[in-house]
Image: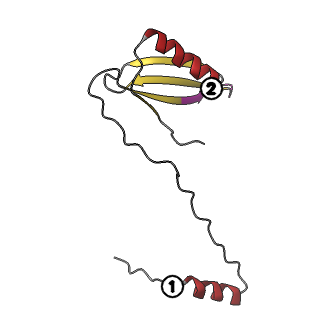
Amino acid sequence: MRKRIVINPKKVYRIYTELGLKYRVEPSKKRLSMPIVPLQIPSSSGKVWSMAFVQDSFYSGKRFRILSIIDVFSRECVASEAKLSITAERVIMILDKLKANRNVPEQIVSEMGSRK
């Protein structure tokens, strides 16, 4: 196991400036200011839905997105919509259509995956 050497940042800065090097200070990462709500473990179907966007591209390079809404308890796909572009208005329209046909869940979890 390697030993970690702790060096005072002021000393590192002094040595860098003596050698004529640039000392880069990394900015601190932004913290999430809103409180984190713990995920609710569903006890029956229709309590919690999960909503996620999936993106892929055709052979020609044109991209398309798929909005999938899944019931977490039963793993049933409640809704799936594939379009070249899915706007917020379109998502609201899909949720309103689901509201007319099904019971509204207690919680909708939006999965925010990595973006590239």
Q: Does residue 60 show up?
A: yes
Q: Is residue 13 above or below residue 59?
A: below
Q: Between tags 1 and 2, which lies in front?
A: 2
For mark 1, give the secondary structure: loop
Q: Does residue 58 show up?
A: no
Determine the residue positioned at 47% across, 17% down: 79
Quarter of the image containing the C terminus?
Answer: top right
Q: Is residue 94 above or below residue 8?
A: above
Badge 2 amino acid: Ala
Neighbor class of circle 1 (other Cα within 10 Å; few <14, some 14-19, many 20+) is: few
Query: Is residue 59 on the magenta stretch?
Result: yes
Task: Determine whether, in the image, residue 33 is placed left or right of residue 44.
Answer: right
Where does the magenta region start and end?
54-61
Determine the residue positioned at 66% across, 84% down: 16
Q: Which mark is residue 88?
A: 2
Q: Which mark is residue 7?
A: 1
Q: CA distance from mark 1 to mark 2?
A: 50 Å
Determine the residue positioned at 37% across, 19% down: 76
Quarter of the image containing the N terminus?
Answer: bottom left
Task: Give the x, y percent position of residue 46.
Answer: 35, 20
Q: Is residue 81 above or below residue 115?
A: above
Determine the residue positioned at 56% across, 60% down: 29
Badge 1 amino acid: Ile
For mark 2, give the secondary structure: helix
